[in-house]
Image (tube, rainbow, N blue to C red):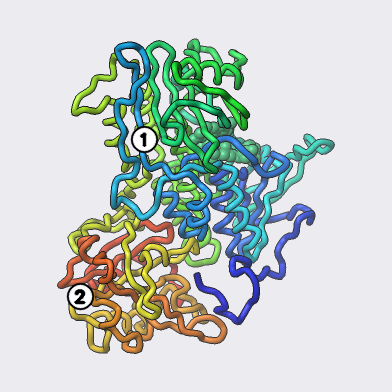
Amino acid sequence: MQFHTNGFIPGDPDVSVAAPDHRRAGDPLPETVDVLIAGSGPAGLCLAAQLARVPQIHTMLVEPKLGPMEKGQADGISVRTMEMFQAFGFADKVKRESVWINETTFWNPGTDANLRRVARVQDVPDGISEMPHILINQARVHDLFMDIMRNAPTRLEPDYGLKVRDLKIDPNAQEFPVTVTLEHTAPGREGQTATVRANYVIGCDGARSNVRNAIGGALHGDAAHQAWGVIDLLAVTNFPDWRKKSFVRSKDEGILMVLPREGGHLVRLYVEMDRLGENERVADRGMGANDIIAKAQRILAPFTLDVKEVVWSSIYEIGHRLTDKFDDVPEDQVRTRSPRVMLAGDACHTHSPKAGQGMNVSMGDTFNMGWKLISVLTGRADPSLLHSYSGERRAAAKGLVEFDHKWARVVGAKSEEDITDEGLPRVAREFVNNLPFTCGLTIQYEPSALTGAATHQHLATGFDIGKRLHSAPVIRLADAKPMHLGHCIEADARFHLFLFAPAGDAGTAGGTVAALCDWLENDPASPVRRHTKPGEDVDAVIDTRAVFQQEFRALDYGDMPSLLRPRVGRYGLCDYEKVFCVDAKLGEDIFTMRGIDRAAGCMVIVRPDQYVGHILPLQARDALTNYFSAILRVRG
Ligand code: FAD
């Protein structure tokens, strides 16, 4: 991380200097805001954490609960989400606090009806990511985003005790066209209302979203008519795989999943409960924690389960649902107006918790949305950029809903249908096949203005255009630090342009990288010059970095072109963190690992949300200019 860029500041570097006009706790509600976020779940907080870092954006987050969540709901964090946490700066903290899921086991009844372990598989395939698959309480994830918000220049805090009741959009208003009716929920103020006008309203208000209803959206899909119990508990058991993720299928009592949790003792169980009638609601059965425990004991028998403390429990019914559009603009009006209201997370897609995706996909939605909103609200991009949010994320959510449907059927299959071949029961085999999906790594955005065509994919076969950047180890030249290339990407709405140097290029004058950097820095036709406002740091919008094929002692930092040694901040201090070399010491050569053409090198454009936007030859200056012109405004 970099700090002291604008002068020495003592104390915790995670705490930014406060913006002078930030709202303080207890201040009256504002009349207008740039962005009003409904809901402080993972989707809302992930968005708020990004916006809070931009002092000129006024954001408000309303939440009907009276304080932060303490326990319950989701707990699965995929490797892809951990990569995203790295960009927020708290992946290491999560790694320390959480339980890592390394192995998953499968238990079936044997011939004597006693349970036996029939398979054990590695949970995260080797080399798929530098991050682990972990489990942690959703409330801790909330805390980590809220730490970012309250330490950001805007010192953003949720406004608890307030919910969005309704909203209206004035299609003729240019400024603050969305009028939001807020309703107080705190004791003594229930039902009182207030009005706030916003430029954008983001519905992160869960499956029963009022924001979705207000824009005429509806969730379509089906319910499985099967009740499930989820329970977090502290217990003593002789079941041997209590600290492994385990699928347990009993002969006659149904199935359960064991999910070890953070701290070494806590465990979550998902337990198959009763079938529901066609028109029956799960609440009608009046089931509670004792029913879940009794059922879990029957499924796990003859192993024992002695529950010492129930931390949290819930009974739910699986539904797979999706809205038609994640914003307020009907398809036939896309050309004439831009979104003012957008939906994210459970407000626009719901699925079963079995694949552990709900929290991940919800945060993925607002990580996709955050940089787009920031780009629009800071004048870097036209508001039409926001159309890409619904297009990209609805496709991702649709893939999840379809996958979840399939997976729920596999998990719910009766044991006699669970035919074994290749030495693995069907559920274990499907589990292994689905790992790239459940790791969150299969999302690939379709070609569009943001995602280039695959014309030059052969220049870097390990960086799939449209997929997230698959990071690899490098050595930073200036201080010889071994690190992951992807870890220089922060959640700060900047694009990244990685120049992979051709063989023999040492960054010196006359070489390909130096010539390209000179053009990028000085030619008015280059995207760096076109899209960076006068007075902004040269890397404020497009952050250019280079990776060389030599090991670090073979290169001289002083030879690097000035774009790779930019002067930043109010003192014009040098940014020493733009140049990297292969990690020859560990033998981990990023050029080999990611299939980069050694003779030609290439440019890899990475979007602010860590997805590969395009791959181009180092000479393709016009194509580079065209890529950014389709996304960003000319401000140079
Ligand atoms: P949510 O986390 O649902 O957050 C929505 C927020 O909006 C809430 O804080 C809510 O209070 C607030 N809100 C509601 N109405 C309004 C309004 N009108 N205006 C403003 N704010 C509003 N997933 C699992 O993987 N495993 C589980 O065991 C599991 N259990 C769950 C149990 C419950 C009771 C619920 C509700 C969800 C559970 N989930 C579980 C799903 C998982 O938590 C979600 O997929 C995930 O939290 C989605 O994040 P989100 O931010 O979209 O929505």
The picture places residue 420, in percent across and down from the top left corner, at 23, 22
Q: Earlier in the sequence, mark 1 or mark 2?
A: 1
* Along the viewing direction, whichever of 56 and 587 lies nearer the viewer: 587
Q: Residues within 10 Å of mark 1 (few under 14, many from 20)?
A: many
Distance from the alpha carbon under mark 1 to that under mark 2: 43 Å
Q: Secondary structure beneath disc 2? A: loop
In the figure, 95 relative to 208: above or below? Answer: below
In the depicted structure, whether residue 57 falls above or below residue 220: below
Residue 344, position in %: x, y?
A: 51, 43
Kind of residue at disc 2 = Pro
Q: Nearer the viewer, mark 1 or mark 2?
A: 1
In this view of the protein, which residue sits in the foreground, 404 or 56? 404
Residue drawn at (47%, 20%) of the image: 272
The answer to whether residue 93 is visible is yes
Q: Please tell me whether residue 143 is drawn above or below residue 551 in the rendered image.
A: above
Q: Which residue is labeled 1 in the image?
A: 104
Please name the amino acid that badge 1 sits on.
Thr
Relative to 302, residue 208 above or below: below
Furthest-front residue in this view: 238
In percent of width and height, residue 381 lies at 47, 63
Q: Which mark is residue 502?
A: 2
Q: Position of residue 628 (x, y in %)?
A: 36, 66
SS class of the residue under badge 1?
strand
